[in-house]
Image (cartoon, rainbow, N blue to C red):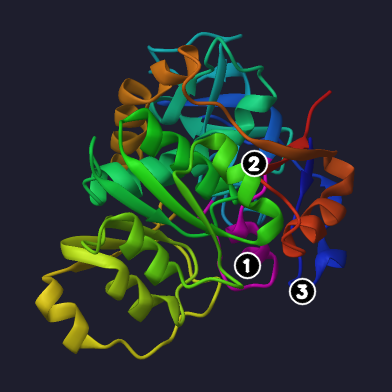
Amino acid sequence: MRAVVLNEYGDTDVLRVVDVTDPIAGPEEVLVEVMATALNRADLLQRRGLYPSPPLAGFPVPAPEIPGMEFAGRVVALGDRVSSLEVGDEVMGIVGGGAYAERLVVHERQTMPIPTTVSLRDAAAIPEVFITAFDALVVQGGLTSGRTALVHAGASGVGTAAIQIAKAIGARVVVTASAGKLAACEALGADLAIDYATADFVEGALGFTGGEGVDVVLDVIGGDYVNRNISALRVGGCIVQVGTMGGGRTDVNIGMLLPKRATIIGTVLRSRPIEEKIAITKRFAAEMLPLFDQGRLSPVIDSRFPLSAIAEAQAQMESNANTGKILIDVCD
């Protein structure tokens, strides 16, 4: 099969499509023909050697290092104990790596059905960002109807998913984005979109909430946003840190945090045990997938590239030009 294998780390010129042996499904796993995958910021870090993936399922040790954290495709082979899927089923899901390839192996319970309103290839834009946003806002952040979220990088993949999820459950959402992307955030349902380059998001969030502050902050930036997030938070609120695009180190003013009786949670999906990945996948499928069929959620797709143009696709993500997801068509 064709796959993008990292034999070295560096800029986009290290991304090469080569032939590798197909993975083999274990007893509770399925072999999926990958029709499409999607880019994530973690892929860029992995390419630079800063975010190694766990060992890939289905390969002998040492396994090739194949990036890619989400997929949509068709089941082409079943492990001996698989009971919930059949060959030919169309599925999507998250994986620790391996989705930049024509085939991958995944546990049957980590797969989800494709919503009827979404094409098979477009479904690759759903798993990673929608599960991340759902887990951060709802499961860990406790966002519910009537509460308010502050979402940074509102036009990113996670941001566009977070806006939709917040509105679908009846919450209000304030977002930050660059000037050229504010309208896209508002079109998705953002109640207030703030240009982070020209306006103070703390002032905007406090003004929007009548001075009380927001209930949950979903932050992919980190750096000097941390103290400002605390200032924008209501008493008893929660900050969920899912990325550090602005830097992983900063000075935190604990003196501000204490009277807020606030919580800061750091979280990632990739390194979680398989049991936790299955649990969040099943909960997302039960609570959120029906909203796609109802037209209340939909993937936001910026552009798509063939697997052979993976370097160009990653360069586009690094330029921060995209609104929503960048898809990669893998199999014909």
Q: Are marks 2 and 3 in contact (CB under 8 Å)?
A: no
Q: Amino acid at mark 3?
A: Gly
Q: Earlier in the sequence, mark 2 or mark 1?
A: 1
Residue behind mark 1: 45
| Residue closest to the eye, 297 or 121 | 297
Residue 51 colored in magenta in the image? yes
Q: CA distance from mark 2 to mark 1?
A: 16 Å
Residue range corresponding to the magenta coloring? 38-55
State the residue at coordinates (48%, 63%).
220
For this rendering, which residue is in front, 193 or 153? 193
Is mark 3 in CB contact (under 8 Å) with mark 1?
no
Q: Which residue is mark 3?
A: 10
Q: Decide which of tag 2 and tag 3 comes sooner along the chain.
A: 3
Quarter containing the N terminus: top right
On screen, residue 214 above or below 184: below
Residue 239 belongs to magenta span: no
Q: Which residue is mark 2?
A: 99
